[in-house]
Image (spheres, rainbow, N blue to C red):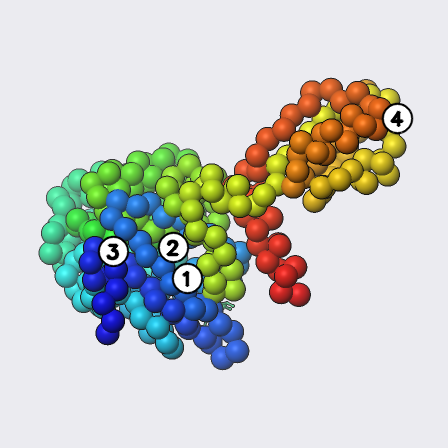
Amino acid sequence: MTTTEADTGAVVGFDQVTKAYGDVRAVDGLTLRLHPGETVALLGPNGAGKSTTLDLLLGLKQPDSGSVQVFGTSPREAIVAGRVGAMLQSGGLMDEVTVAELVKLAAALHPRPYEVSDVLARAGITQIADRKVNKLSGGQAQRVRFALATAGANDLIVLDEPTTGMDVSARQAFWATMREQAVQGRAVLFATHYLEEADAIADRVLVLHRGRLLADGTAAEIKAKAGARRVSFDLQGPIDEASLRALPFLTSITVSANGSGNTVRIQSTDADATVHAVYGLGVYPRNLEVAGLGLEQAFVAITEAEEAKQS
Ligand SMILES: Nc1ncnc2c1ncn2[C@@H]1O[C@H](COP(=O)(O)OP(=O)(O)OP(=O)(O)O)[C@@H](O)[C@H]1O
C-alpha cells in the first residue's frame, strides 16, 4: 500500500478508484481527499455514481481497482473502530422493535455512545419512541435513520439523500445537528438532489458525472466554473425576437409576454458584451438585472456541457 495523504490526516482518501457493473463504469478513476471539519455535498444526475461512491467508502462494495482509505485504514476497520456513522437511502430498519429499542441498540454497539434520550431528542423522535418501527411514516423513518447515524460520536458522517421525505422542521433540525458535528471537527459527506441544500450547507461541493469528478470546489467556485451569468430585462411594445436570439454569447434565451410587453431571460457566457449588444439593438431594456447562476443552474450547465462533449 502506498503512503498517501490519507495516512497523514485526511479523513477519506480515494486513489484512482474504479467500480464497474458489467459495461457500466459506476465509478471511473476517482481520486479524492476529504478533511476533518469539512461538510461536503456530493452532487450528480441520476446514475452518476453517488451511491456507489458512498458504498465504496463504507466498505459495502469493493473497488475493481484503486484504493479507498478511511482515516488511513480500510473502511471496515474505521467502521469497527466506531469512527464512521452512515445514513443510507435504502437502510432497512428492523421491523418488530420500537424506535427507542433500536436507538438503544445502536448506542450500545457504538464505542463512544451518546445518551439515548439526547439522540432521540435531537432527531425529534422522543414522542414516537415507543412506536414500532414498521408503523412509521416515511419522514419519521428517515428521522430514525438520522438518530441511528448519530447515536455515537463519529469522526465521519456519511449521508445518502438524508432529507428526502423530511418536512421543513425535520430538515432544519437535521442540518443544525450536522453543523454542530462539523464545528466539532467531524467531516460530513452527503449526497443530495437538493441543490439549494448543498448551496446553503456545504463548504465544498463535488459534482460527479458518469463516475468521474467534474467539479470540486466551494459552491461559489462551482457557479463561477459554469462560466455563465443570467441577464433579464423587460421590453415594452412589439419586439424583434430574431435579433434577440442572435445576441452574442447567449447560451439560452426565453421570451415571455408580460402585461405591457415581454420579459427576456438570457444566460450568457459574457454578460457585459451581451448587455452592450442589447443596447446596440436600439431598444430600451427596463428592470435590467445581471446575476450569477444559482448552484442548480450551474450544475445543469456543467453536466450538460459534459454530455455534449461526450456525445
Ligand atoms: N448493483 C448494480 N448492478 C448493476 N448496475 C448498477 C448497480 N448499482 C448501480 N448500478 C449502475 O451504476 C451506475 C451508478 O449508480 P449509482 O446508484 O451509484 O448512481 P447515483 O448517482 O447514486 O444515482 P441516483 O441519483 O439515481 O441515486 C448507474 O448506471 C446504475 O444503473
Q: Residues within 10 Å of mark 1 (few under 14, many from 20)?
A: many
Mark 4 element type: loop
**Badge 4 is on which residue?**
238
Q: Decide: marks 2, 1 in contact (CB < 8 A)?
A: yes
Amino acid bearing label 3? Ala
Residue drawn at (82%, 23%) of the image:
283
User: Tag on residue 122?
Assistant: none
User: Mark 2 or mark 4, which has the lower sequence index?
Assistant: 2
Number of the front mark, 2 or 4: 4
Q: Picture coordinates of residue 107 (x, y %)?
A: 15, 53
Number of the front mark, 3 or 4: 3
Rounded to the nearest whole Å, what is the CA distance between mark 2 and mark 1? 7 Å
Rounded to the nearest whole Å, what is the CA distance between mark 4 and mark 1? 51 Å
Residue drawn at (78%, 38%) of the image:
247
User: Is the residue indicated by label 1 positioned so its CB lies within 8 Å of ligand 1?
Assistant: yes
Rounded to the nearest whole Å, what is the CA distance between mark 3 and mark 4? 60 Å
**Badge 3 is on which residue?**
10
**Badge 2 is on which residue?**
160
Q: Is residue 103 among what the camera can see?
A: no
Rounded to the nearest whole Å, what is the CA distance between mark 3 and mark 1? 21 Å
Q: Quadrant of the N terminus?
A: bottom left
**Picture quarter containing residue 277?**
top right
Q: Picture coordinates of residue 29 (x, y %)?
A: 43, 68
Q: Quadrant of the C terminus?
A: bottom right
Amino acid bearing label 2? Asp
**Picture quarter containing residue 81?**
bottom left
Please state which of residues 295 and 47 is positioned toward the viewer in this rendering: 295
User: Is the residue indicated by label 2 positioned so its CB lies within 8 Å of ligand 1?
Assistant: yes
**Badge 1 is on which residue?**
51
Amino acid bearing label 4? Pro
Q: Residues within 10 Å of mark 2 (few under 14, many from 20)?
A: many
